[in-house]
Amino acid sequence: MKSMKKILAAALVMGMVICLSSACGQNSSENGKEKLVMAYQWGLAYAPLEIMKQEQLIEKYYDGEIEVEWKTLNGPAEIYEGMVAGSIDVAHSGVGPFLINSMKSGEIKMYSALSAQPMGLNTTEDRIQSIKDIKEGDKIALVGYGSIQHVMLAMACEKELGDPHALDNNMVTMSHPDGMQALLSGSVPCQLTTSPYFLQEKEESNIHEVEDVAAAFPEDATIIVGSTTTKLHDEKPQVYQALVSAMEEAMDMLNNNQDKAAEMLCEKEGVTADKMKEFLSAEGSDYDMKPHGTLEIAQFMERADFMEKAPADLSEICFDNIL
């Protein structure tokens, strides 16, 4: 089956993390001070990282000199390939790609959940009111095969169409910003995306949500997580603790000082602080270091052949600080 070959190819590319024990953890710069390379993607699901970056929180909590490099990449495949190559130390991605890579390698674990966010399928086509109305030629923009958006779509396909991979051949890979532009311009009729793009699109008069897609996803489930290698965790405990402490402070700001958080985040997304605060407090937006719904998502992914085996317990895929 063509769609399944695509899934397996994506999993194999990301599954190359078996080489991590020798490739990663080289986080020292030439001048001898520590270096940490952080990779993440687009959208408000990654808001804690933007706060960590702007406030230099990792530097604040590390006892010594540390250089933190930030890389914004378009999709999870780039991020985990970077981990394999040793050019990325800490990955942030959808929980789906994380689960694939964590279970494949045994050497990647979650150091923090990041967020649950408003996420769903938007369309410009009046005829598409249900996932059942999507035809063979209707392209669906999302960030990649095996992404959490792909998993959400597969859950809806299983529920409504009886086959989790019924719409795999409709998918086209685009970053969230590119996918939104493609939807607005009419290049694609559908995009499955997350906040703020999902919310901004719904403000357009010619765009509506296909609601049975999000309805199939576990309520309040974590969609974005942060992970690093057991090598970094074990061999660089001070770096690891600085990372965790920085995330804790960023989460505290997002949950208890949204005015300040909105002021910090609005410029990057090109909106006012008031609009940013509206996004941060939207229904379905939740910033929490504890993962929610992860095992349920993993069980589905095993059943739908996204991964060979789901973890039996969070301890298999999470470091102790978030258990």
Image: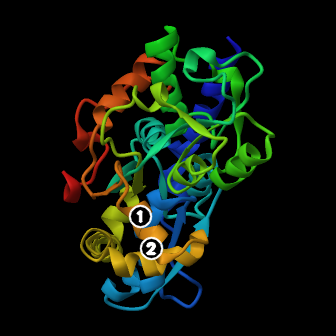
Amino acid found under the numbered disc labelled 2: Asp
Residue at 30% across, 42% down: 220
In the image shown, does 229 or 275 lie closer to the viewer?
275
Quarter-of-image position of residue 52: bottom left
Mark 2 secondary-structure assignment: helix
In the image shown, does 220 or 51 lie closer to the viewer?
220
Circle 2 packing at 10 Å, graded few (<14), some (14-19), many (20+), is few
Q: Position of residue 265 (x, y in %)?
A: 49, 74
Q: In the displayed image of the protein, which residue is found farthest to the top?
A: 162
Which quarter of the rendering shows the N terminus?
top right
Q: Position of residue 233 (x, y in %)?
A: 33, 63
Q: Is residue 141 left or right of residue 59?
A: right
Q: Which residue is mark 1?
A: 278
Residue 94 appears in view: yes
Residue at 47% across, 53% down: 21
Quarter-of-image position of residue 41: bottom right
Q: Is residue 224 left or right of residue 143?
A: left
Q: Which residue is mark 2?
A: 274
Mark 1 secondary-structure assignment: helix
Q: Position of residue 170 (x, y in %)?
A: 70, 24
Circle 1 packing at 10 Å, graded few (<14), some (14-19), many (20+), is few
Residue 307 appears in view: no
Q: CA distance from mark 2 to mark 1?
A: 6 Å
**Eyeballing the image, is 11 above or below 265?**
above
Residue at 45% across, 41% down: 105
